């Protein structure tokens, strides 16, 4: 209700504003950014509109990530999709498979003669949104990664060194036990997004396959592989530690993040995008560190992958409008703008140049926690197992995986049985997805 | 001599019926037919590729053990919510029907929750019972009870049942109160003069006279639990943990809207439609006989 009214108001405002210069071509941009990031989006559109008179970008807030994606899909089915749709990373495979519905960004830029070099982007970012032939299909916008946040005051209280956070999983378990003994008895450590961090990122970070065919990047005929001994061992550890609250489950999404800022959980794994919240709400000394790994796994840690979202250009629009979209994307990728976006929003700088610029400015000396996710992404050149992941039906699949993990944590299933079930149920969904896209 | 009025016109009666028929067709038969049609298709989210598969979506659905689990969950959930919401609101209505001071305010407060959107109601309950931050949850935990709706399916079920019941009590209360107030005082007084105590008066006189209201509410409540509760479930538990609170309608919502599996979701909603039609038919066939109008 609110969304619709907001949209009407936004559209009405846009129409009124557009009236004097009737020649302006309007570019609709649907997004899911709230709070500070919504302001950033509006500011970007405003700045772009001020640079020229031919086009006019109109940002419209469409609700949460799934809401925005669904709104875009529904609008496409009804024949009036927006020009630009922000889609979260788990929707990537769905968008990529919808060949008739999207306009690949590399093609758009080439047709409009706008400068565009996929090599300018951080490899982990470009790889995530490119085909196996290296063609970038969507425009990276707000990218994040996962990190381990920790409470330095709590570390001091438990006799741990606040400047040497645990690096490996066994060290995290040890630290969490000490923290528990020091009074954090409800939660030694926890994790938001249980599957993203403990299945998806976990696989990439340890250079073990999450699924075959380079985690789905090389084709939709992929099969899940995360019921390996390493995955089972990790889940079993979580189950064992859950018994005395050394590990405490915080749900499937990030709703449990408040447990870190309130001081209840002194170690918390979640997105680097949590930064704004921590900065505003944590009343203690905090920091973040790279995600832990099992030291006996050869090659670990490998490199992390992205969260966040990218901008998809929808298909079937007139060339004149695409010219405007291309201009806007070129505008977004300017180095200064990317650097500002990074330092304002806490999202990653998506181009190499922007990253270098921020680094040269000395910003990370004051704000090292904004660099942690970038260092993780760039840790090593990506392998078959760590380029990213691209699985269809991902939104639904994550729920299914989480269900099985919950059953294991609640003691209804063994770790092996839960992961086997998650893999086999996921495979059924992958086959269904493959079937709907292959024609 | 025949006194009946006979209209000769063929067009006028149809014209008069038309608006009602149109509304029914557009808002009920058309979407229902769409759902049935969609349930025979396998389609990608964008509608770019469509394959007609006859009953495959149904076959997949009925071969899925999770679907039977969610049927069981629905049975537990709907029974609990219906029983609690009907009995609690009847209790409240009976109390509000007594001669007490400030009855107007009392009634108004009882009706308020109905104006709250299901999702908001869900979030309110979530805030109170969220294991680490919720006020109520903290006191439960302080008493030594390991309250954990994020992993314990029974706790999660208790939470959604409470929220769904709370949401429906106002509506039931309103009808029960109206029903109670329409019972002639003379009947109750006569029973009192005959020496019947309040409890006996209630069960032998008042409750039978309330039976049409109760029956109506039973049907409405079951339909409510089946169709209107996914907002609450979505905001409180998201169907978890481990599908512990995934009811049939929530599954339709999550598979179709979140998962983009339109064919499967349509098949589920057709099954759900058949179930509710059957349930309503049974209610009217067997339970309504016990109703005294």
Image (cartoon, coloured by chain):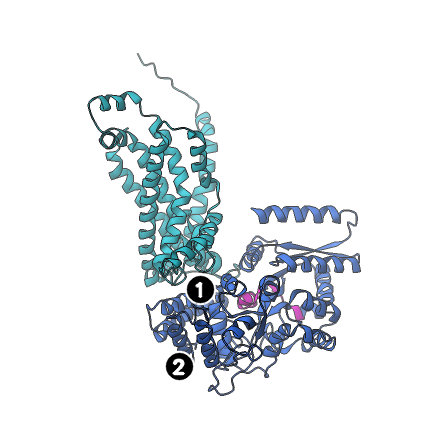
User: Circle 2 marks a residue in which chain?
Assistant: A
Q: Is residue A438 left or right of residue B286?
A: right
| Residue that lies at the very extreme toward the left in this rendered image | B194
Q: Is residue B268 left or right of residue A363?
A: left
Does B154 appear above or below B277? below
Q: Earlier in the sequence, mark 1 or mark 2?
A: 2
Q: Residues within 10 Å of mark 2 (few under 14, many from 20)?
A: few
Indicate the position of residue B236 as horizontal and vertical percent values.
Answer: 44, 55
Q: Which residue is mark 1?
A: A399
Q: Is residue B172 magenta?
A: no
Q: Which region is colored magenta? A: A88-106
Indicate the position of residue A29 as horizontal and vertical percent values.
Answer: 66, 57
Indicate the position of residue B181 as horizontal and vertical percent values.
Answer: 35, 27
3D distance between C-alphas at marks 1 and 2: 22 Å
Q: Residues within 10 Å of mark 1 (few under 14, many from 20)?
A: many
Q: Secondary structure at mark 2?
A: helix
Q: Which chain shows up in blue?
A: A
Residue at 71%, 49% (x, y): give it: A14
| Residue that lies at the very extreme toward the top in this rendered image | B1
Q: Which chain shows up in cyan?
A: B
What is the count of numbered marks?
2
Does A3 appear above or below B182? below
Q: Which residue is mark 2?
A: A229
């Amino acid at each position: 209700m609110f969304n619709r009214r907001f949209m009407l108001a936004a559209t009405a405002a846009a129409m009124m504003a557009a009236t004097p210069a009737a020649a302006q071509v309007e570019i609709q941009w649907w997004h899911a950014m709230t709070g500070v990031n919504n302001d950033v989006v509006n500011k970007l559109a405003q700045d772009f509109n001020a640079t020229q008179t031919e086009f006019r970008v109109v940002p419209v807030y469409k609700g949460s990530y799934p809401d925005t994606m669904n709104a875009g899909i529904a609008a496409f089915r009804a024949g009036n999709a927006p020009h630009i749709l922000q889609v979260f990373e788990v929707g990537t495979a769905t968008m990529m498979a919808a060949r008739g519905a999207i306009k690949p960004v590399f093609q758009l830029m080439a047709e409009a003669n706008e400068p565009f070099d996929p090599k300018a982007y951080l490899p982990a970012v470009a790889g995530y949104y490119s085909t196996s032939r290296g063609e970038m299909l969507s425009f990276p916008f707000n990218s994040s990664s996962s990190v381990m946040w920790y409470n330095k005051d709590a570390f001091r209280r438990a006799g741990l060194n606040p400047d040497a956070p645990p690096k490996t999983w066994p060290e995290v378990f040890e630290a969490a036990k000490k923290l528990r003994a020091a009074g954090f008895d409800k939660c030694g450590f926890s994790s938001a997004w249980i599957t993203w961090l403990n299945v998806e990122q976990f696989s990439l970070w340890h250079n073990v396959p999450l699924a075959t065919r380079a985690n789905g990047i090389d084709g939709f005929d992929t099969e899940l592989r995360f019921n390996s001994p390493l995955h089972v061992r990790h889940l079993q550890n979580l189950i064992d530690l859950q018994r005395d609250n050394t590990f405490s489950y915080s749900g499937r999404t990030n709703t449990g993040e408040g447990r870190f800022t309130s001081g209840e959980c002194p170690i918390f794994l979640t997105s680097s995008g949590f930064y704004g919240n921590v900065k505003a709400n944590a009343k203690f000394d905090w920091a973040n560190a790279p995600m832990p790994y099992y030291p006996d796994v050869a090659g670990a840690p490998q490199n992390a992958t992205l969260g966040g979202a990218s901008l998809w250009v929808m298909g079937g629009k007139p060339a004149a409008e695409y010219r405007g979209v291309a201009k806007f994307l070129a505008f977004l990728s300017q180095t200064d703008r990317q650097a500002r976006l990074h330092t304002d929003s806490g999202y990653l700088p998506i181009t190499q140049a922007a990253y270098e610029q921020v680094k040269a400015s000395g910003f990370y000396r004051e704000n090292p926690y904004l660099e942690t996710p970038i260092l993780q992404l760039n840790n090593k050149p990506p392998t078959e197992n760590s380029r990213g992941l691209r699985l269809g039906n991902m939104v639904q699949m994550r729920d299914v995986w989480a269900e099985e993990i919950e059953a294991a944590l609640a003691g209804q299933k063994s770790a092996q049985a839960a992961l086997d079930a998650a893999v086999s149920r996921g495979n059924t969904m992958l086959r269904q997805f493959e079937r709907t896209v292959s024609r | 001599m025949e006194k009946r009025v006979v209209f000769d016109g063929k067009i006028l009666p149809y014209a008069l019926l038309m608006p009602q028929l149109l509304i029914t067709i557009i808002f009920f038969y058309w979407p229902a037919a769409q759902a049935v049609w969609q349930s025979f298709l396998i389609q990608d989210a964008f509608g770019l590729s469509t394959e007609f598969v006859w009953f495959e979506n149904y076959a997949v659905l009925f071969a899925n053990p999770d679907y039977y689990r969610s049927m069981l969950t629905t049975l537990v959930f709907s029974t609990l919510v219906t029983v609690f919401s009907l009995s609690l609101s009847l209790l409240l209505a009976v109390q509000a029907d007594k001669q007490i001071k400030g009855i107007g305010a009392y009634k108004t407060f009882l009706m308020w929750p109905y104006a709250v959107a299901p999702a908001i109601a869900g979030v309110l309950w979530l805030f109170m019972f969220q294991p680490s931050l919720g006020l109520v949850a903290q006191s439960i935990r302080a008493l030594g009870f390991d309250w954990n709706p994020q992993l314990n399916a029974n706790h999660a079920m208790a939470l959604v049942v409470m929220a769904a019941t709370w949401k429906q009590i106002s509506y039931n209360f309103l009808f029960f109160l109206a029903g109670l107030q329409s019972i002639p005082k003379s009947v109750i007084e006569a029973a009192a003069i005959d020496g019947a105590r309040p409890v006996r008066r209630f069960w032998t006189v008042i409750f039978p006279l309330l039976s049409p209201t109760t029956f109506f509410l039973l049907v409405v409540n079951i339909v409510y639990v089946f169709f209107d509760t996914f907002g609450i479930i979505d905001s409180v538990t998201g169907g978890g943990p481990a599908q512990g609170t995934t009811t049939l309608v929530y599954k339709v919502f999550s598979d179709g809207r979140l998962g983009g599996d339109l064919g499967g979701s349509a098949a589920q909603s057709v099954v759900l439609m058949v179930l509710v039609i059957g349930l309503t038919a049974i209610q009217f066939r067997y339970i309504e006989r016990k109703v005294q109008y």
